């Protein structure tokens, strides 16, 4: 998958490389984002864990935070309806493992940055946009970055469904990249799954 998609996924990993104190007046979705920040940091900063233990806990943590299968299905677009159940399940697994590996590896690049929750905008009874700002990077002098998190569900049952980075929608961008691959490979979902698996193996081997 092209570098611009990787960059967006890597920026999404910044969600876990932050610390913040909960405000008394914050909305439930804001509190969800803040609590997950703390939970992610607790795993990543636990020096008593081995590398494998940390990876396993981070894996489970991400699965509890996001519905990666739903995002995988979204990226397929109409191709999902024509996919055999076994092929769809294989792609969902490949997409999920690729995303988790990418988040974990890229996270270290954002260790010096902090995330400030600036507000929440309910879209309906089950969807809220949580607006945040990623602080300036003191190492590279990159300007603050605006991140909007689309939170699905209700209090006690929230998940992160999508992220907008400086106005660029991550799920839509990922879908564009997947659709391009499918167009170039005659809608071969098996080939798409194999491509994700190969990229995951390369990332794991180089980590």
Image (cartoon, grey):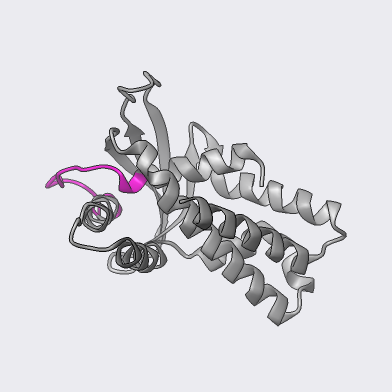
Q: In this view, which residue lies farthest toward the top? A: 141
Q: What's the residue at 32%, 48% (across, down)? A: 16
- Please state the horizontal and vertical placement of residue 112, each as a whole percent of the image: 28, 33
Horizontal relation, residue 16 to residue 25: left or right: right
Q: Main secondary structure of the magenta part?
A: loop
Residue 50 on the magenta span: no
Q: What's the residue at 51%, 50% (across, down)? A: 206
Q: What's the residue at 71%, 60% (across, down)? A: 77
Residue 130 visible in the picture: no
Q: Nearer the viewer, residue 1 or 64?
A: 1
- Please state the horizontal and vertical placement of residue 33, each as a whole percent of the image: 29, 51
- Please state the horizontal and vertical placement of residue 4, each as a whole percent of the image: 61, 37
Q: Nearer the viewer, residue 84 or 140?
A: 140
Segment colored magenta = 15-31
Residue 23 on the magenta span: yes
Q: Quadrant of residue 200?
A: bottom right
Residue 192 visible in the picture: yes
């Amino acid at each position: 998958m092209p570098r611009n998609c990787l960059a967006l996924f890597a920026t999404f990993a910044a969600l876990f490389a932050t610390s913040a104190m909960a405000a008394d007046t914050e909305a439930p979705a804001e509190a969800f984002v803040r609590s997950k920040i703390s939970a992610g940091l607790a795993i990543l900063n636990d020096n008593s864990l081995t590398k494998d233990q940390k990876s396993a806990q981070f894996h489970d943590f991400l699965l509890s935070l996001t519905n990666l299968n739903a995002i995988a299905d979204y990226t397929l677009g109409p191709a999902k309806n024509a996919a055999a159940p076994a092929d769809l399940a294989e792609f969902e697994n490949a997409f999920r493992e690729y995303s988790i590996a990418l988040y974990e590896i890229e996270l270290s690049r954002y260790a010096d940055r902090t995330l400030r929750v600036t507000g929440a905008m309910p879209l309906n009874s089950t969807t809220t946009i949580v607006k945040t700002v990623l602080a300036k990077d003191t190492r590279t002098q990159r300007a603050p970055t605006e991140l909007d998190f689309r939170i699905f569900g209700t209090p006690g049952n929230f998940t992160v469904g999508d992220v907008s980075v400086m106005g660029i929608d991550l799920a839509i961008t990922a879908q564009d990249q997947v659709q391009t691959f499918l167009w170039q490979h005659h809608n071969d979902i098996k080939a798409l799954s194999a491509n994700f698996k190969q990229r995951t193996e390369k990332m794991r081997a180089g980590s």
